[in-house]
Image: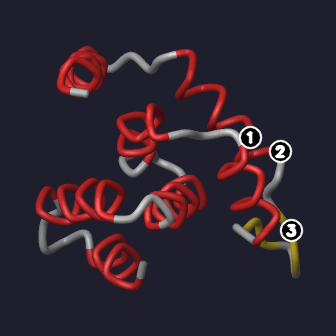
Amino acid sequence: MKAAAVLCLVGLATGQTSPRYEELKRVIDRNTGFAHMTRGMNMYTLYALRSCVTEKDLPVLGQLLTDRDRVTRMSAANVLADFGADGRKAIEKRLRELTRKDVDDRLMLSDV
């Protein structure tokens, strides 16, 4: 588990994303809903993402919390919450990293 966390940090430091990151991002994008001309997360997004991740993907889901796309961040946070204590640790870690200016993300992560 520690080795995966180190690899995750190395990937973040170099600005590169792993193939698994890209794969999970595609799952989210393909299962995103559209209503009233707005793109958003729905239960199908969460079902699709949850069905293709395991505990080994926790570091990647933690990385997805830093993505530019709000729908990706929301989806990753909701799926992390399904993983119990380990998922909550990743969410709390991201909350500690956020600044006061990141009000939207702080509220979203607090709600999850």
Q: Residue at x 53, y 28 (%)?
A: 21
Question: Is 73 placed left or right of 44 in the picture?
Answer: left
Say which residue label 3 marks: 34
| Disc 1 residue crowd, few under 14, some 14–19, many 20+, Cα 10 Å | some
Label 3 element class: strand
Q: Residue at x 76, y 71 (%)?
A: 43
Of the 4 image quadrants, the one containing the C terminus is bottom left
Three-letter code for the amino acid on which mark 3 is drawn: Phe
| Disc 2 residue crowd, few under 14, some 14–19, many 20+, Cα 10 Å | few
| Disc 3 residue crowd, few under 14, some 14–19, many 20+, Cα 10 Å | few
- On screen, residue 27 above or below 100: above
Q: Residue 86, image x and y in percent?
A: 30, 54
Q: Residue at x 26, y 14 (%)?
A: 14
What number is the disc on residue 27?
1
Q: Which of 56 and 41 is in front in this view?
A: 56
- On screen, residue 86 above or below 17: below
Say which residue label 2 marks: 30
Mark 2 touching mark 1, by CB under 8 A? yes
Q: Residue 82, image x and y in percent?
A: 50, 65
